[in-house]
Amino acid sequence: SIRAFCAERLAGYKVPDAIAVVAEMPRGAMGKLLRPRLVDAATDAVSRSTPR
């Protein structure tokens, strides 16, 4: 349903191919979002769910 929501509101190329739900966003000591860790976690989640 998240993909359908995005498809209704975004251009086709902006709709995500995969969506990973996480319990908590990775943050550093100052509370800033750690984007590299977020990308790594998303890549791991997608690779685990993609059949080979």
Image (cartoon, rainbow, N blue to C red):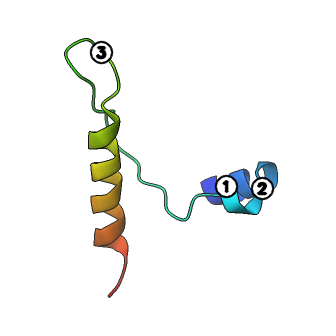
Q: Is residue 44 left or right of residue 6?
A: left
The residue that disc 1 covers is: 14
Q: Residue furthest top?
A: 30
The crowding category of the residue bearing disc 1, from other C-alpha atoms within 10 Å (few below 14, some 14 to 19, many at least 20), is few
Residue 29 visible in the shown view: yes
Structural distance between the alpha carbons of marks 2 and 3: 32 Å
The residue that disc 2 covers is: 11
Structural distance between the alpha carbons of marks 2 and 1: 5 Å
Q: At label 3, which amino acid type do we have?
A: Gly
The reply to whether callout 3 and callout 1 are in contact (CB within 8 Å) is: no
Q: Which residue is drawn at 35% across and 26% down?
A: 33
The reply to whether callout 2 and callout 3 are in contact (CB within 8 Å) is: no
Q: Residue at x 74, y 62 (%)?
A: 12
Q: Residue at x 28, y 70 (%)?
A: 48
Question: Please, is residue 28 above or below residue 5 in the view?
Answer: above
Q: At label 1, which amino acid type do we have?
A: Lys
The residue that disc 3 covers is: 31
What x and y, as percent, mark residue 24? 31, 33
